[in-house]
Image (spheres, rainbow, N blue to C red):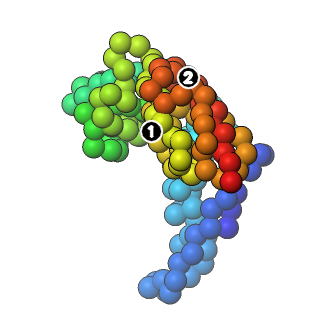
Amino acid sequence: MGYAPANDPRIAVLVVLDEPKTDVKYGGVLAAPAFAAVIADVMRYMEIPPTYSATVPSQQSTSSLVTVPDLLGLALPASMSSLKAAGLVGRAEGAGAVVTNQVPKAGSRVAAGTTVVVYFGPEQLYNLEGDFVEVPDVTGKTLKEAAILLGARGLTVQPMGRGIVARQQPLGGASARRGSAVTIFLEE
């Protein structure tokens, strides 16, 4: 069991190995590498910068850092080419036509060779004419269902109450800026 980041824990990870088939059965040998890999991915996903790195000296010069390019709206080949040209590695997630999200975000400064997770989704989730998306109608949905639908469009959720979504603001079908909050009013 471990927590991260150490100075302000926001993530808890438990690694359980049932009957490992090895002579060495110490947690530091078996569980620690899995823990480190999970924490590194989760912290990158949550955009929590590491406070130190065991593999990169703290005196690393800023000249060895590269800037993550903006991949939103690009197709798979173009996005991977952009990452390669920047000295980064890409990992594609999803089955859509264009990039709808990326972690780390565009403009982040990272070490060369860092893996950028590139999320692909339907083209309508990324509006090439601007940064606006259509708000889905989530009335009648649970909080979890609403959060998934809104999150897929790049919108955040501001829940009020408990139960099932009775109404929402802005309404389904309206246009909203990606990253903005949709207030959902839940009733039991």
Judged from the image, the secondary structure of the residue bearing numbered disc 2 is helix
* Placement of the C terminus among the 4 image quadrants: bottom right
Residue 30 in the image: state x and y as whole percent.
Answer: 53, 72
Residue at x 61% of width, y 42% of height: 166
Which disc number belongs to residue 152? 1
Judged from the image, the secondary structure of the residue bearing numbered disc 1 is helix
Identity, as a three-letter code, of the amino acid under mark 1: Ala
- Disc on the earlier residue, 1 or 2: 2
Occupied quadrant, residue 36: bottom right
Residue at x 64% of width, y 33% of height: 183
Reading the image, the residue beneath label 2 is 62
User: Above or below — where is 87 with respect to 51?
Assistant: above
Residue 165 in the image: state x and y as whole percent.
Answer: 60, 45
Residue at x 57% of width, y 75% of height: 16
Residue at x 61% of width, y 50% of height: 164
Q: In this view, does 67 lie to the left or right of 48?
A: left
Identity, as a three-letter code, of the amino acid under mark 2: Thr
- Mark 2 Cα within 10 Å, few/some/many (few <14, many 20+)? few
